[in-house]
């Protein structure tokens, strides 16, 4: 019996960014971007499990109102985040060494802008009742979503008029 490749299952993610720092329109303008500056070990570990082709929701955090702005995809798997080595970067980590980096990034690209879906609207969706996205105290900038959560959010956003 020969070797059989297992298909890679698409995973789904939520990426949070402050729109005045880097918003979905910035991602569209840049065409692709390394998701830099993640300095939480759990969020970093999530990025290390991402595969090229995985899908994400781009969420505007610390905004009025916060919410989902678009869909993105992983175009390059996790690799060391170069900002950790740059003393001029606000994400510089003097304890991280090039031969033993602490922090990674993935490269994301835009897929499609969505009609903005606010956090208040997300809270009304029964499909998200158990979602980590709506959990109290959840401050991770990168987190997993189930396929059902991802699809429900995209369907809800696209069923509305802008």
Image (cartoon, rainbow, N blue to C red):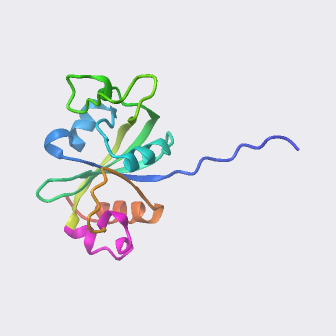
Name the residue: 40% across, 60% down.
150
Q: Position of residue 22 (x, y in %)?
A: 20, 39
Span of residues in magenta: 120-134
Image quadrant where residue 108 sits: top left
Q: Position of residue 43 (x, y in %)?
A: 38, 48
Name the residue: 88% across, 44% down.
1
Q: From what the image shows, is residue 6 above or below residue 34?
A: below
Residue 123 painted magenta: yes
**Quarter of the figure with the C terminus:** bottom left
Image quadrant where residue 30 sits: top left
Decide which of 93, 73 is in the foreground and name it: 93
Left of 135 or right of it: where is 67?
A: left
Q: Position of residue 73 (x, y in %)?
A: 41, 43
Name the residue: 30% across, 67% down.
134
| Residue closest to the far right | 1
Left of 145 or right of it: where is 114?
A: left
Name the residue: 31% across, 68% down.
135
By secondary structure, the bulk of the magenta-drawn segment is best described as helix
Q: From what the image shows, is residue 138 above or below residue 123?
A: above
Q: From what the image shows, is residue 157 above or below residue 100?
A: below
| Residue closest to the far front | 95
Decide which of 44, 115 is in the foreground and name it: 44
């Amino acid at each position: 019996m020969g070797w059989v490749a297992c298909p890679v299952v698409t995973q789904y993610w939520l990426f949070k960014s402050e729109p005045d720092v880097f918003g979905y329109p910035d991602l569209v303008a840049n065409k692709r971007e390394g998701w830099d500056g993640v300095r939480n070990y759990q969020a970093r570990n999530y990025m290390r499990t991402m595969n090229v082709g995985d899908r994400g929701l781009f969420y505007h955090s610390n905004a009025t109102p916060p919410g989902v702005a678009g869909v993105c995809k992983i175009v390059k798997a996790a690799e060391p985040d170069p900002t950790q080595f740059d003393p001029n970067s606000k994400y510089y980590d003097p304890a991280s060494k090039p031969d033993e980096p602490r922090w990674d990034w993935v490269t994301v690209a835009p897929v499609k802008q969505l009609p903005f879906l606010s956090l208040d609207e997300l809270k009304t969706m029964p499909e998200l009742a158990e979602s980590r996205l709506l959990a109290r105290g959840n401050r991770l900038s990168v987190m997993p979503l189930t396929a059902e959560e991802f699809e429900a959010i995209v369907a809800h956003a696209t069923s509305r008029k802008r």
